[in-house]
Each structure stands twice: as structure tokens, then as C-alpha cells.
Image (tube, coloured by chain):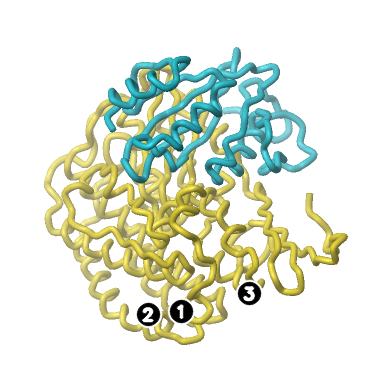
Chain colours: A yellow, B cyan
Amino acid sequence: MIEEIGRTTEGDLIINIGPQHPATHGVLHLVITLNGETIKKVEPHLGYIHRSIEKMCESLSYRQFIYVTSRMDYLSSHINNHACALCVEKGLQIEPPQRAQYIRVIMDELTRIASHELWWGAMAMDLGAFTPFFHAFRERETITDIMEKTCGARLTMNYMVPGGVMAELHPGFQRDVERFIQLYKSKFEEYSELVTGNVIFQNRMKSVGVLSKEDAISYGCSGPVGRASGVSCDIRKLYPYDIYNKVEFDEITETEGDSYARYVVRLKEIQQSIRIIEQLLGNIPEGDFQAKTKAVLKLPKGEFYQRVETARGELGVYIVSEGGTTPYRIKFRSPGFSNLSALEHMVKGLKIGDLIAAMGSLDLVIPDIDR
Amino acid sequence: MLNEDLKSKLVEILPLISFEDGGEWLNAYVPPEELLACVNQLRATPGFDFDYLFCLTCIDWKTHFTMVYHFSSTLHRHNIVIKARIDRMNPEIETVSHIWRTAEMLEREVYDLFGVVFRHHPDLRRLIMPDDWQGWPLRKDFEDPVNMIKL
């Protein structure tokens, strides 16, 4: 239940951030115990956007349940769909055609860029800079336009299906993506001038919310949060899926583990994503975009687990099948859930303003945490 | 370490362990009262070093629950799945949150949705559902005439 604003017996102040608060980027509710301005305790309260997706999936077929997962981490819906499609394919033991695999990886990386773009704008806005938000959206708009032309949607794409992708790429896809890459490269300098090199920004980010390597592992952190603490946890490198083993890219790791390191990792990741897209874009093989599958999919009895790297970290899809047309139990291991659990450890003893910076650098998407 | 090597080493230190075929990773069953001893070994034994708990969940099999722990090692890059069957009427198991900090919230989630009680958990409360919620939503026999939409 929501605690009222009040004081503990020791005279500490209890305040609520959220569920409606611009800095939580969604309906996250944090109950914070403060001694003066120093944080003593952070307690996340979840569930304001809990839709029980796992329960819902138990009554949906293996084709239908993928559409629900777009609503989990809505900023990387392509990658969520990809994870589910891969997991079903693992159970059916089918391999999508090469063309589909290329398209999937390009789409994944475009999504990652779009997601990091939005985070970059929101991160700067958390710290009081409003302009970067519009700059970020200007570039992100180009990606959503590409998505809209091919998938028909701008946010919940539902483009990946078991066996491949749902539809052919739109005719000018290659040209559109090339145009985006050109645009993005011309703007990248602007990004560092506007935010990264800013002294105020650096002062607020450096040495704030430090997470050591051991703690990052113990808290199950993944994605940019884990990599900023020096944990090598990029699923694309460790357990490659589709054609990630054929493309060249670097796994970005930093050692500081502070908010600034997480910021740097994400910005560098955007460039790696562009590197991946550039390698693939001109070489998409001809052929089918979807493998032939039965109209009704039935997974054999057993358990299937698929890990993928979303923009926020490791997403796991765990399907327990009893041999029917619907999953018996499905579990989504969401990256944001584990990353959030490290928040209290990061900000204990810091000032309340630092909490906003540290939370922004975690890149939380609340529907992904609540599911 | 390969699955076969893991298997032979595990049998040496934990005689009560049993294995299940299938799956890409090694699936091992342990008796629930042995769970803590088992995972302690997995974490601390050099060569195993399972330091990363990436998934913790529960499955309702109508007759019993199965707790499922997915571990991996950031050092050796091997994975293992540990399972424990627990009683459905009185579901209780030891917490692992003092070994892997991420388990604290994951166990709260399992408690919230399945009603599994984790002994010695530092703060076992509902996490996602409201505090006054009745019932355990992810159990197979859960019925909610108001909020649930049946397809």
C-alpha cells in the first residue's frame, strides 16, 4: 500500500516518487527514506502496469502470444518478438531462411538505436536539459518511419513470426536505411557537443550510482548496466543467434560502473549497431522471407529457453510445453527487473538528485518490469 | 565445462542429485531440503563458479510445484538448471537471496504469484499485486471473475 508522507521514529523523512512522476518514465513507484537529503532506503513498488502477460500467454497459441510480448518492452518490441520467434523455432526445430535472418538482425539493430536514442533524450531531460530530447526524437523519427513502411506500425511492430518475418521489406528499404545512417553520422558530433562534453552533465554523472563488477553479477545486471561495470554479458557475442556470429562488432565494456560509464556504453553501442547494419544492408540474400510452417503450431513436450540481447539487457523466454498448441507455462526473464533490483545498492548514501541520475542511467521501461 | 563433465562432478559432491534428459543445458533435480547445500556448492566450488542467477521461477504442475533456477557462470560460461519439487499444499523452500542478491526480488515475485514461502527471506511481501489481494494468480486453479478475460 502507498505509505503516507511522514517521518519514521528516527526522524527520517519518507517520500514517494511516482507512480506518476516524470523521472520514473512510467508508473514506477519508489518509497524513499531520507535523512535530510541523504538516501537511506529505496523501496520499489511494482504492479501499476501489471497485465499478467505470463498468464495470458498460457491461453494463447504459439502464433498469437508473440503479439502480447510487443507490449512488454515497447521500446525494443522487435527484439522481444525475435526472442519468442526463436524460442518457438527451437522447439519446432526449424531454421528461418537466410533472408529472414538478415532482415531480423537489421531490424533488431535499428530498434536498438531507436531505443538508445529515446533513452539519450530522456536521460538529458532527467538532468534538466530539455533540448536533447527533441534532437533525439528527430533522428528516431527516421527509424520509426522505416518501421512504419515495412511493418505498418511505429511502436508495437509484431513483425517477427516463427519461421521468419511477416512480410517482405518495403521497396525503398535499403535507401531509407542508408539515408538514416548518413543523417545519424552527421549528427553524432552534435550529441557530444550538446551533452557528453558538458561539464555540468559530467559532474552529475561521474562517480554517481557506482556498481562494482561483483555486485553487478550478484544482482543479475545485464546489458549496458552490466557492461558498464565490466561484466562481459553481451548475448549477441556469448550465445549468438541468427547471423550474429557472422557480423563483426565490438562488445563495449567499461570498468568504472558509474552512471557516466553506462551513458558511454550506450552511445558507443549505437555506433556498433550502425556498423552491423552497414555490413548487412547491401548483402541481404534473395529468397523467401519465411520458412514454410504449419498453420497450427504444436511444440513437443519439453522446455525451451532462448536468451537474446535487447536494448536493456538479457531477455529470456522460457517455454514449458506439454505438447499442445498453447504453452503450459511461460516465463519472461526481463532485463529491467534485475537492473532495478540493484538501484537501492547504487544510491544508498547519495543525495536525492543523484537518484534521478542513477535511475535514468538504468534505462528502465516499466511495462517490461511489471509484465 | 561441458554438460557431461558437470554431471560427473556434481554426482561426486551431491549424491542425492538426479538428472533429467533433454534440453540444451544440464537439468538437475535436488530434494528441496538439499537445495541450499546444493546451490552453495555450485556457487563456491572452484570450477563451477555459478555466480549469475539469470532466471528463477516456478511451475504449477497441479499436483506439485517445481522451482526452477537457471544459473550461469561469468567465468567459465557454462549453464545449469536446478529444479526442486515442492509440496503444493504447503509450498516452502529455503531462500537463496543471500547468495545471489537478484533472488530477493525474484523470490518476492514468485511468492506473489504462486504463494511459495521462502524461508529466511529478508522481506517476503507481495511485489506486483496489491497488498490486500487474495489468491495466487499464476496458479492453474486461480479464478478471478472480475479481472480475468478468458479466451
Q: Circle 2 sits in a helix, a strand or a loop, which is it?
A: helix
Quarter-of-image position of residue A192: bottom left
Pair 3/2: label in front = 3
Task: Using the rendered image, report if marks 3 and 1 lie on a common chain.
Answer: yes
Q: How packed is label 1: few (under 14 Cα within 10 Å), some, or many (20 or more)?
A: many
Residue pointed to by mark 2? A191
Query: Would you say A278 lies left or right of B25 here?
Result: left
Secondary structure of the residue carrying tag 3 is helix
Q: Secondary structure at mark 1?
A: helix
* Residue in the picture at 43% in, 29% down: A319
The amino acid type of the residue labelled 2 equals Tyr
Residue A362, above or below A108: below
Sequence order check, earlier mark of 3 and 2:
2
Q: Position of residue A3 (x, y in %)?
A: 81, 55
Q: CA distance from mark 3 to mark 1?
A: 20 Å
> Which label's residue is closer to the chain start, 3 or 1?
1
Q: Nearer the viewer, residue A24 or A289?
A: A24
Residue A353 circle label: 3
User: Which amino acid type is shown beneath numbered disc 3?
Assistant: Gly
Q: Which mark is residue A132?
A: 1
Q: Are marks 3 and 1 in contact (CB under 8 Å)?
A: no
